[in-house]
Image: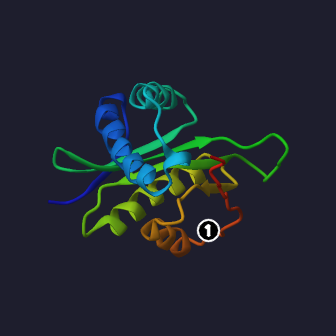
Amino acid sequence: MPIDVRPADTGDLPEMVALITEERKDLAARRPVYWRPSDTAQEMTNAFFDHLLGQASTRAFVATEGDQLLGFVIATDTAPPVFAPGGPSYLVDDWVVLPRPDRLAILEALFEAVEEAALAAGAAQVVCVAVLHDADKHEILARKGLDNVCTWATKPLS
């Protein structure tokens, strides 16, 4: 069955939240202090994603195969006011795809949807957050010509 990429809508929220909740479990296992979810993480994520999907400047897409949601990406028109890149900056912070053999292709299709939408909106750049251990995302970012311009580091203090 072919994979379809389409704009996300609020009907996709339950599956989007479920996917990111599973990803966050993996993140918490890797870095328990930094990624530990709050007791209200799912409810807050649902409310936040609902808010984002309601924003005219948000570009959000889902990848589906039949009735199954395989992944999603959310890009927001967000740039710190101290920078002037020459147009809007679209920030991809939430980009999740189920682990499966064609994960790279799905990640790439979702990223391309954001890139095309950002270009159509007159964006100057796309900024993407990807955790260090996600080699698939880093491969897609390299293929698409994104430069690594920042790294965050964390150290538990207790």
Residue denoted by label 1: 146
Q: Is residue 112 above or below residue 118?
A: below
**Label 1, residues with CA under 10 Å away: few <14, some 14-19, many ≥20:** some
Seen from this angle, which residue lies furthest front? 158
Q: Is residue 89 left or right of residue 75?
A: right
Tell me residue 152's x, y (percent): 67, 57
Q: Residue at x 44, y 53 (%)?
A: 27
Quarter of the image where one finds residue 97: bottom left
Give me the residue at 53% from left, 68% from top. Answer: 141
Q: SS class of the residue under badge 1?
A: loop
Q: Position of residue 78 (x, y in %)?
A: 67, 41
The N terminus, quarter of image: bottom left
Task: Name the residue located 58 percent from the left edge and 50 percent from the top edge.
Answer: 118
Q: Is residue 151 above or below residue 46?
A: below
Using the image as rendered, state which of residue 24 and residue 14 is in the foreground. Answer: 24
Q: Is residue 55 left or right of residue 103?
A: right
Q: Position of residue 48 (x, y in %)?
A: 49, 28
The residue positioned 51% from the left and 69% from the top of the image is: 138
Amino acid residing under circle 1 = Leu
- In the rendered image, residue 14, in percent from the top left (x then y), is placed at 30, 32
Q: Residue furthest right?
A: 82
Depth check: give the residue in front, 79 or 21: 21
Q: Nearer the viewer, residue 18 or 77?
A: 18
